[in-house]
Amino acid sequence: MIECLVRCLVFALLALSTGVAHADTWDRLYGRWTGRGEVSGMAAEVELEFRRTLDGQGRQLSFANRMTDNDGKVWKFRAEALYLCDAAGACRGHWYDNRGIVLPLSVVTHEDRVVVEWGADVTERGRTTYRLAAAKRLEIIDEVIDKDGTSRIFGRVDAARID
């Protein structure tokens, strides 16, 4: 009996240290958001929606970005991401976009943000941070990791919850 209690306590502590303590961060992301900012030097207008899927084990993101360059040319970017999360709160998944790119994803949650590492040796690599700011505000920061290992921000958007 004592051995079982010790195992349960150890498992609970491990679960808390790997993300369950911040599971509510996902809960605060669920819903629809819209925002403006700059991505790759262009004005960006984004719409995104986070939702639960796969009987609560999954998270899904639908993302759309309408970017306008200085000459007025418009580029529409769309993507879907699907994450599968384990009982300890660790999430992994894939990103699919209209460029025909598929990127592997891994997620770390924090009290105020979800950080998604994306890419692999055969693709581009980077990081997207979804930081919950003031009430109903979301800051999205996109970074790419260059060949030399340095990262640089290529996108920054401020979004507001719309539902």
Image (cartoon, grey):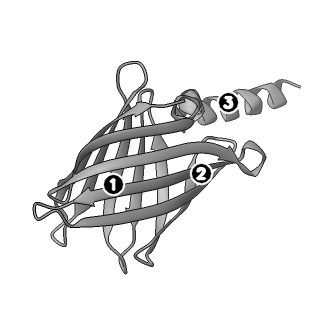
N-terminal of the two: label 3 or label 1? 3
- Tell me the quadrant of the picture where the N terminus can be found: top right
Three-letter code, disc 1: Arg
- Tell us which disc is closer to us: 3 or 2: 2
Which residue is labeled 1 in the image? 127
N-terminal of the two: label 2 or label 1? 2
Badge 2: few (under 14), some or many (20 or more) residues near its Cα, within 10 Å? many
Q: CA distance from mark 3 to mark 2?
A: 26 Å
Q: Quadrant of residue 137?
A: top left
Q: Which residue is found at the position 57% from the left and 47% from the top? A: 90
- Tell me the quadrant of the picture where the C terminus can be found: top right
Number of marks:
3
Image coordinates for residue 115, horizontal then vertical, percent: 40, 45
Which residue is labeled 2 in the image? 60
Which residue is labeled 3 in the image? 12
User: Considering depth in this image, is 55 or 136 the residue closer to the camera?
Assistant: 136
User: Considering depth in this image, is 156 or 149 the residue closer to the camera?
Assistant: 156
- Tell us which disc is closer to us: 3 or 1: 1
